[in-house]
Image (spheres, rainbow, N blue to C red):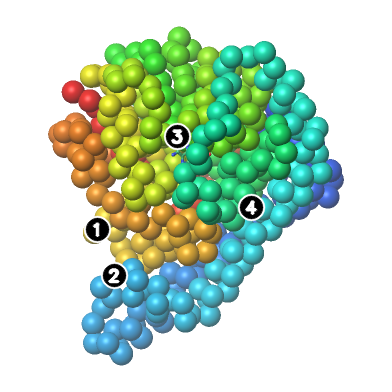
Amino acid sequence: MNQAPINVPPAWHRIGKHEMAPEASHDEIARFNFLSNLNKHLATVISPGNRVAYDKRVRPRFIREKGRDFQNRREVREAMLKDPHFQTWSALRRSAMEMRQQAGRSLVLRQAKELAQKAARLNEGKDTLQLNPNLVIPPYIAKVDNHLMPGSYHTELFEGDVSAAANYDMGLFVTTGGALGRFNDGGGKAISQWLLSHHPEFKPKRILDIGCGLGHNVLPIAQAYPDAEVIAIDVGAPMLRYGHARAQAMGVTNVKFIQMDGQFTGFPDESFDWIQTTMFLHETSGKSIYAIMKEIYRMLKPGGVTMHIEQPQYTPEMDLYEQFIRDWDAFYNNEPFWSKMHDIDVVELMMQAGFKAEHVFQTGVRAVNDNEDHTKPRTPEPEDHGRAAVWNVFGAWKK
Ligand SMILES: C[S@@+](CC[C@H](N)C(=O)[O-])C[C@H]1O[C@@H](n2cnc3c(N)ncnc32)[C@H](O)[C@@H]1O
């Protein structure tokens, strides 16, 4: 008998472990595995029902009552909010996000001191970690618990704390169902493979990654270009402390982690060949995204490239239901800039920074996932909107 393969996310033991990773007990692992499966179930079994509710109930009713179709995603949202299937899925998804934070936080907080000591040991005496305790945290980070993460990326519970980063590192496989690979680095692998194969002649000597977080996606870039000097910046000290220690533990030593604001870095003009951001711009703000892009243009050498990995933009061609469901994170997952960022005309954004329209490009990349068995055909599955490991990349060459 031909049975459809059971599509479950990889279990905890499949996650890549490194020396900085927190210890997890049997019950903690069971909780993570449950949450990862819950997320996958919500995405693949329950969420497609939202589309059915829209097509069969919500849209026909709207057309009947108003005598016209939806004109924008706000109207779709208002109508879908009254639908019981959407209400149930949305409440469950929100609970799954809250439980994921609780699971990650309780895991790391009970061993916060040990994790800080481990990081301090791995970081000791290295000039590749530079922190700035006087850095002003941008208000859009300081005032928001981004994606329900208490204290966001920057909060330190004590001197040398890394718990925000350890929580982020361990929980990412829950929200993505392991789709980013064993070390959550599928985006960085995909973009460096894309650049190597599409522009083999391009040999960047200095690379900058802005909003590097704990470095998930900058390490594969540094590995793909081992002779390059790679600088990774972020405003959050816990991310950089943990990220630097993790990189050392993983044997990637050509990355410098520096605490800096991407809006005003102080790097000289025309000092980088490649400036990268990965899942970063949607977490900035309406003003800072323009400031960051101008700073990128200033820092980029002529002949250099900048690329930005994000979920797809809401273009006028995108179906209104698709825009609405992709917008969930803006309303229920503390992503205040999500909607606005995905509405931006990226060509306009790049042009305002100084790039020429004809040098702006867009492409798509899919995460390189070493959790998948590449000897078997990929099982088609419904997309988890806003979480998919398939991204839009926009960028520009400076010429
Ligand atoms: C979603 S995380 C990015 C993850 C990372 N790029 C990766 O690929 O794993 C966003 C990061 O951007 C940082 N960030 C936000 N605003 C920033 C700014 N103005 N300058 C530098 N980093 C910033 C946050 O502290 C956070 O670590």
Q: Marks 2 and 3, Cα distance to the nearest angstrom?
A: 35 Å
In terms of sequence position, does the residue under pointer 4 or pointer 1 come before the other? Answer: 4
Q: Does residue 69 sit above or below 339 in this rendering?
A: below
Residue 14 screen position, x and y as percent: 69, 37
Q: Which residue corresponds to mark 3?
A: 261
Residue 174 screen position, x and y as percent: 64, 49
> Is residue 377 left or right of 77 when viewed as pictured?
right
Category of crowding for the residue at label 3, using alpha-carbon neighbours closer than 10 angstroms: few (below 14), some (14–19), many (at least 20) = some
Is the CB of the residue bearing disc 3 within 8 angstroms of ligand 1?
yes
Q: Secondary structure at mark 2?
A: loop
Q: Which residue corresponds to mark 1?
A: 317
Disc 1 residue type (three-letter):
Glu
Q: Secondary structure at mark 1?
A: loop
Q: Marks 4 and 2, Cα distance to the nearest angstrom?
A: 33 Å
In terms of sequence position, does the residue under pointer 4 or pointer 2 come before the other? Answer: 2
Q: Marks 2 and 1, Cα distance to the nearest angstrom?
A: 12 Å
Q: Nearer the viewer, residue 295 or 189?
A: 295
Disc 4 residue type (three-letter):
Pro
Q: Secondary structure at mark 3?
A: loop
- Marks 4,2: beta carbons within 8 A: no
Q: Nearer the viewer, residue 300 or 274?
A: 300
In terms of sequence position, does the residue under pointer 2 or pointer 1 come before the other? Answer: 2
Category of crowding for the residue at label 4, using alpha-carbon neighbours closer than 10 angstroms: few (below 14), some (14–19), many (at least 20) = some
Disc 3 residue type (three-letter):
Asp
Q: Marks 1 and 3, Cα distance to the nearest angstrom?
A: 35 Å
- Residue at point 32%, 30% (across, down): 296
- Residue at point 71%, 55% (across, down): 102
